[in-house]
Amino acid sequence: MRVLIAEDDPKIARFVAQGLSAEGHETSLVHSGRRALERVENESFDLLILDLGLPELDGLEVLRQIRARRNEIRVIVVTARGEVDDRVIGLDLGADDYLAKPFSFVELSARIRALFRRTEGGAERVLTLGQLEVDRVERTLSRGEGAKVPLTSRELQLLDYFMKHADEPQSRAMLADRVWGYQFDTGTNLIDVYVNYLRKKLRLVNLEPVKTLRGIGYVFDAAACSPVS
Ligand code: CA
């Protein structure tokens, strides 16, 4: 796999690059946001490991520009700031995962494997439930012949999971484990934030299948995908 590491701290850059090389990946290093953007634009990488605090162009701006150009490179955002806001912004802008500094290489490596397991999976391209149709390659949802609503890769994973487990109550911990592939620190509301992003997109096609189960979590109501009109 070709990995671009955008990190201005030489120690961290080196330890990530050495670890990934030892696992057999081809790694490239850049130290500024501008350079990261140039290389992503002009070359083909499987993964970008993106520090948010970068000179010239910060990581969030790099991410924004990458996604604005419809580049679907997988991105793991790394930040020292550790603020929920940053991570929500990062994920909302289309990062696939988030890692707070300091992190161990083992942790990074596990996240990378989980990310590729989730996004490759060899599953069918189009998933349907009632009138809801999801194109996993285009990363869109739609209803009947209506407009296609773009999804971030995380929203797609969440929706995919919900559709395959329709009518089964899901706790936040289960969603964290099954969709994100790891446990969140207690107290973060990332799952709720993501469920709400997804709800907004489903509402654009007039579907409201994601129900809150008080004290439990959520359930994806299959019947709500085939509303009587
Ligand atoms: Ca930095």
Image (spheres, helix red, strand yellow):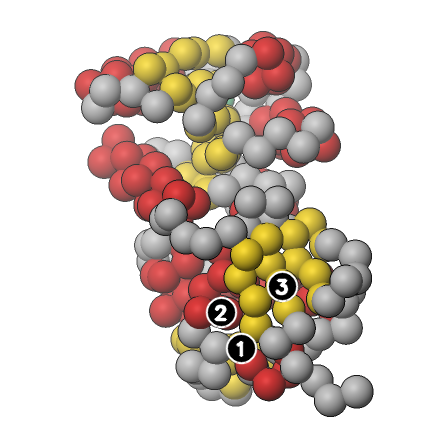
Q: Residue at label 3?
A: 133
Label 3 near label 1: C-beta < 8 Å? no
Q: Crowding at label 2, few (<14), some or many (≥20) Cα neighbours within 10 Å?
A: many
Q: Residue at label 1?
A: 220
Vertical arrangement, residue 164 with respect to residue 31, above or below? below
Measure the C-alpha gap from mark 1 to mark 2.
6 Å
Q: Earlier in the sequence, mark 1 or mark 2?
A: 2
Q: Crowding at label 1, few (<14), some or many (≥20) Cα neighbours within 10 Å?
A: many
Kind of residue indicated by mark 3 = Glu
Vertical arrangement, residue 170 with respect to residue 33, above or below? below
Ligand 1 is within 8 Å of the C-beta of the residue at disc 3 = no
Label 2 near label 1: C-beta < 8 Å? yes
Circle 1 — which element?
strand
Q: Which residue: 40% across, 21% down?
A: 3
Measure the C-alpha gap from mark 3 to mark 2.
13 Å
Closer mark to the observer between disc 3 and disc 2? 3
| Mark identifier at residue 104 | none
Kind of residue indicated by mark 1 = Phe
Q: Position of residue 37 (x, y in %)?
A: 61, 17
In the foreground, 13 or 119:
119
| Mark identifier at residue 162 | 2
